[in-house]
Image (cartoon, grey):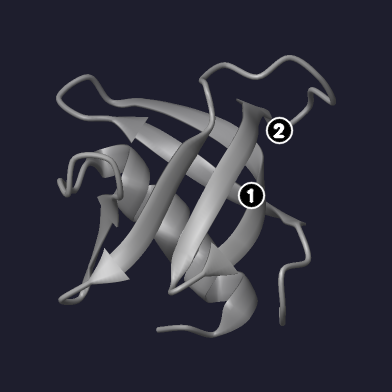
Amino acid sequence: MEGNVAYTVFFTYDVQDHGLQFPLKAEVKPTGAGIYTVTDIRPESQEEGSLLPPIRIKKENGEWIFVDNGQPSNLSSTIGRAIEAVTSLA
């Protein structure tokens, strides 16, 4: 994916320590400087109704972090790996 074109990524979110897995999808738009805005995080089978507000993530020192607080999480890592699978950023 090149430029600032939005695209959809699919990923499975694992709830740590509970053995729960949720197949999700989200819209991703590169915004420059390696930052990605992720919107419309929702169940894979659902076309509307985001579960979370928009987030911004970037890869820094080999891990995906939230731009707002500079911290990694299971969610940022999972979405980051989905972005890499689509864009070959690995």
Q: Quadrant of the N terminus?
A: bottom right
Would you identify the image quadrant in which residue 81 lies? bottom left
Amino acid type at circle 1 is Phe
SS class, disc 1: strand
Q: Residues within 10 Å of mark 2 (few under 14, many from 20)?
A: some
Name which residue lies at 40% across and 84% down: 90
Q: Is residue 40 left or right of residue 84?
A: right
Where residue 30 appears, x then y in whole percent? 60, 64
Q: Is residue 34 left or right of residue 86?
A: left
Q: Which mark is residue 60?
A: none
Amino acid type at circle 2 is Glu
Name which residue lies at 19% across and 48% down: 72
Q: In this view of the protein, which residue sits in the foreground, 33 or 25?
A: 33
Name which residue lies at 63% across and 49% down: 10
Q: Which residue is mark 2?
A: 44
User: CB of mark 2 within 8 Å of CB of mark 1?
Assistant: yes
* Above/below status of 90 relative to 59: below
Name which residue lies at 71% across and 33% down: 44
* Above/below status of 19 relative to 13: above
Q: Which mark is residue 10?
A: 1
Kindly give the residue lying farthest to the front in the view shown: 32
Where residue 7 appears, x then y in whole percent? 76, 58
Q: CA distance from mark 2 to mark 1?
A: 7 Å
Q: In this view of the protein, which residue sits in the foreground, 32 or 38?
A: 32
Where residue 79 appears, x then y in whole percent? 45, 51
Q: Considering only order in the chain, which callout, 1 or 2, is on the residue closer to the N terminus?
A: 1
SS class, disc 2: loop
